[in-house]
Every structure is written in structure tokens, then in C-alpha cells.
Amino acid sequence: MELGLKGKVAIVAAASKGLGRACAEEFAREGAEVAICARSAANLAKAADSIRKATGREVFAQELDVTRHEAVRDFVAAVEKRFGRVDICVTNAGGPPSKKFVDISIDEWRAAVDLTLMSAVYFAREVLPRMKKNRWGRLLAITSVSVKQPIDNLVLSNSIRAGVTGLMRTLANEFGGDGITVNCICPGYTLTERLDELVGLQAKNAGVEREKILERLSAQVPAGRVGRPEEFAALVTFLASERASYINGCSIPVDGGWTKSLL
Ligand code: NAD
């Protein structure tokens, strides 16, 4: 299927590793101009290099913290300067810590809101006016299956990602008439460093090997296994494409069937 992504300019936030990195690589494979950011310059350079090698495409990379509004503003402006436009933006950030409600301080709540919700607000504020000017755009937020079904010990994710979903659903209404679609993609268990960290924590708490925890997670999934980042990236690139022009305001899981709800 021709996705029509050749020459489109795609920003992927928090893309030095994991899901973001996989999305950036998939966009580059489809011939898009790709811009990535993350906090660690070294990891970012490594990711940009390996995407260049794998796809032969140039990758614009800038070190930044997505919780800093000015940094996001300057990054989006730099991408526009470099490529002439911004067509696609995938919002993303590291996951908030996994803790029980009573163990979370007020400062940790504030930090999680900055990381998960405000970072998406910052990107949306910068990219939507540019997309509106061009009468074409795709805003995509990486959320979690926790918006469909809360996950134990992830109260920060369960709560704040619902806010991101509300934000994106509202933007889908506001910008739907401007040739822009806004959707959320909800990863289920997918083998990245984030999952590895959560598995390690659960293994420590339960006093068992990591493999045991991975087996338990896999047993919760009808597909019988956790996902691969490129399986997630396949949906993201499709939703960003011309072919997905009538899909707007959705939250779509990529979870091997883990979510138990009907819709
Ligand atoms: P990951 O930890 O493997 O990668 C996170 C990326 O975000 C890294 O590149 C990191 O450098 C970057 N990052 C973190 N904080 C940042 C900041 N403040 N500013 C800029 N960059 C920052 O995580 P992942 O598995 O790719 O997950 C991506 C998102 O999806 C996370 O929010 C995670 O909670 C969520 N999620 C993941 C899974 C899963 O199974 N992998 C499941 C559900 C939800």
C-alpha cells in the first residue's frame, strides 16, 4: 500500500529509544523527512545514526527535555526552518513512575503532569497552527492501554493519560475541518527499555526472575506474547498517512488483544 509519506515532514518526540525510535525509523523507511528529540545527546546521536544507516535518510536530531515549553517551541521552529514545513507530529515522553497512590508525593504528581500531559500540550500548540496554515496535518499521541483499562500500580499513567486522551479528542473536533486528524495510539506491553524496567521492578517486588514476569505478562495477552516496537510503529505510520484521512479522534490499542473492553 502506498502511504504517501514521501517528503512529508515528521516530528517524533522522545525518540532516542523504544516506541518513539521505532516510529522515527518507520517514517524514514517510508521516505519522510524525520526530526527526533530526546534528553540524552549520546543516545539521540546513536538513534539518528542507526536510522540513517538502516534507511539511507537524513535525520534531524535535537537534544531537549519535552517538559520545557521553550525547548519544544524552538525545536519545532528549527524543524520548520530545516525542512520548510511540519506535516506530522507524534507526541511522546518517558513513562511516569510505577507506584502505589499512597507512595506518590505531590511533587511527583506535578512532574508526571508536566511529563505526560503538558509535553503533549506544548507540541500541539506549536504544530497545529503550522498544519492549519498548510491545510494538512497529523497529530498523534502515544498514550497507553491504561486509558482503556487501568493498570495496577500505575495510577499516574492511568490518571494523566486520560487527560491526554481528552485533549487529543477535543483537538480532533477543533481542527478536523482544517485537513488535520488527531488520534491516540495506545501501546500494550511492548518490549522496550520502559517495559524492561517495569518487569525488573515487578520481579524484584515478587522475588522472582524477570523471565517469570514476562511469561505472566504474555499469558494476559491473547496473542500469547508481548509486542515488538515495529508492530506499534506500523499503525503510527498508517495513521500519519494519506490513506488514514478519515480516521479522526480515535484511541487505538496495539496490544495483541490485551484490552478486555468491547470498544
Ligand atoms: P522507553 O523508556 O523505552 O523510551 C522513552 C524515550 O523517551 C527515550 O528515548 C527517552 O530518552 C525519552 N524521554 C524520556 N523522558 C524524556 C523527556 N523528559 N524529554 C525528552 N525525552 C524523554 O519507553 P517506551 O517503551 O518507548 O514508551 C514510550 C511511552 O509509551 C512511555 O510514555 C511509556 O510509558 C508508554 N507505554 C509503553 C508501553 C510499553 O510496553 N513499552 C506500554 C504502555 C505505554
Image (spheres, rainbow, N blue to C red):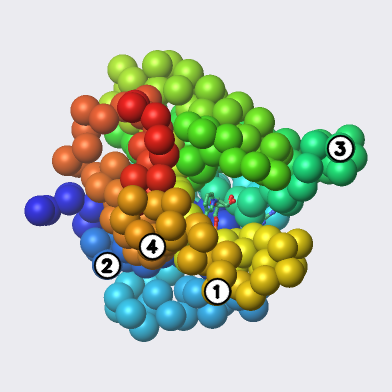
| 4 and 2 marks in contact (CB < 8 Å) | no
**Residue beneath label 2, please?**
29
Within 10 Å of the Cα at label 1, are there few (<14), some (14-19), or many (20+) other Cα atoms?
A: few
Is ligand 1 within 8 Å of the beta carbon of the residue shown at mark 3?
no
Q: Is residue 86 above or below residue 213?
A: above
Q: Give the residue displayed 51% in from the left and 60% down from the top.
A: 216
Within 10 Å of the Cα at label 3, are there few (<14), some (14-19), or many (20+) other Cα atoms?
A: few
Q: Is residue 167 above or below residue 66?
A: above
Q: Is residue 11 visible?
A: no
Q: Residue furthest bottom?
A: 53
Provide the secondary structure element on which disc 4 rests. Answer: loop
User: Would you identify the image quadrant in which residue 248 lies?
Assistant: top left
Q: CA distance from mark 2 to mark 1?
A: 33 Å
**Residue beneath label 3, please?**
102
Provide the secondary structure element on which disc 1 rests. Answer: helix
**Residue beneath label 1, please?**
211
Within 10 Å of the Cα at label 2, are there few (<14), some (14-19), or many (20+) other Cα atoms?
A: some
Q: CA distance from mark 2 to mark 3?
A: 45 Å
Q: CA distance from mark 3 to mark 1?
A: 29 Å
**Residue beneath label 4, please?**
225
Q: CA distance from mark 4 to mark 3?
A: 32 Å
User: Would you identify the image quadrant in which residue 230 lies?
Assistant: bottom left
Q: Give the residue displayed 35% in from the left and 59% down from the top.
A: 224
Query: Mark 2 or mark 1, which has the lower sequence index?
Result: 2
Q: CA distance from mark 1 to mark 4?
A: 12 Å
